[in-house]
Amino acid sequence: GNSTQTFQRITNLITLSLSTPYSSSTMGFIDYVGDNATQIDAKEYEEKVRVDDPKLLQTDEHLVFAFKGRGGSGRDHYMLTNKRVLIRDKKGMTGKRIKYASVPYGSILAFSIETAGSADTDQELKMYARSIGKISLDLVNSVDIMAIHRFLSVVVIQGEGAGEVAAGAFVHDDSANLNGSTSGFFDVMGSNYAQIDKQKVEDQLKSNLNVLLENEKVELAFKCGRDSFIMTSHRVFKIDVQGVSGKKIEYLTILWPAIKGFSIETAGNIMDRDSELTLFFNLPDKPTGAEGYPRNSRTRMKLDFRDGQADLFAVQRYISDKLLGSDTVATSQ
């Protein structure tokens, strides 16, 4: 009947829309409606800022990345300088009222990037700062988000003093992209975390993905399915592969000083053979109804370890040394 034909037409349209790549005009509309920011020339925009707002930037402060909202058609601007995150937010109908928000890199406790997926075509940058809260920025798919990740790793982990050096490395870095194949690193491996070779992981992260600092060392590494949990000399690093295609990936960095406590739980009887590690932190985010509520969704990270696949007390000792400092007395004394 007519209803059957109508349903079939709708099904065909949905199938066609999912299988047909978005046109540039469609993507522009999606980016505008979704308020996805596009990258603009940082050097040119810095010159404009110094003319329009001559007292906004310090003399030795320079823009490394600059973005404009709503696919480049919006009023708001987002800047990563060699010293801070700077947001220019126009308000009201006329836009005469402007809010300038500054977040020094030393205030950031954690940050993450999220690559585009198959259906979700935008990328996302999140930064979690003391007192200020979560700063979230949706980006168009054409932005090299891995270059932003590398820059934030330098200025957030090593400090704003490294910003000037980092600026020179990233302003005109046309080669900042994923290098080589990453399929082997994201292969499915199981349902609980198992410890894996830290040197192999470090080699992958530095060569294929290029997400670690040059002097950063992987000290413990675990894998669960396509996801990875890594503890380095500089950070706690979680790689979360999402969706059926695995194209959407979140890279979450939590600085060691942001970890406020942890717990371990040994395996039980045959019905509960997994051991557990929980890290506690307090990153500002949306509320959750998960274990320990009321709390926000970024206050803890829980990992189940496969029985016999992780030395739980070695992990406990490692984290203790990170948070408390190494023993000052030898074990034999």
Image: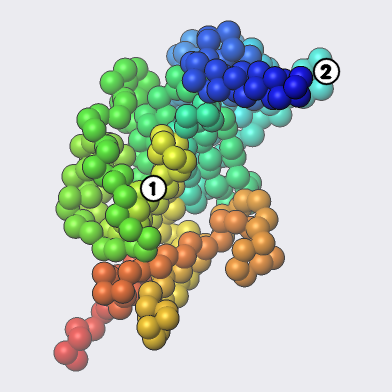
What residue type is disc 2 on? Met
Q: Position of residue 266 (x, y in %)?
A: 38, 81
Q: Is residue 60 visible?
A: no
Q: Position of residue 192 (x, y in %)?
A: 37, 63
Mark 1: which secondary structure? strand
Q: Residues within 10 Å of mark 1 (few under 14, many from 20)?
A: some
Q: Position of residue 276 (x, y in %)?
A: 41, 72
Which residue is labeled 2 in the image? Answer: 93
Which residue is labeled 1 in the image? Answer: 239
What residue appears at the point 28 percent right and 21 percent down from the top-left corner? 175
Quadrant into which the N terminus falls: top right
Residue with the most extreme front position:
1
Foreground residue among 2 and 225? 2
Residue 173 has which mark? none
Q: Quadrant of residue 282?
A: bottom right
Foreground residue among 13 and 85? 13
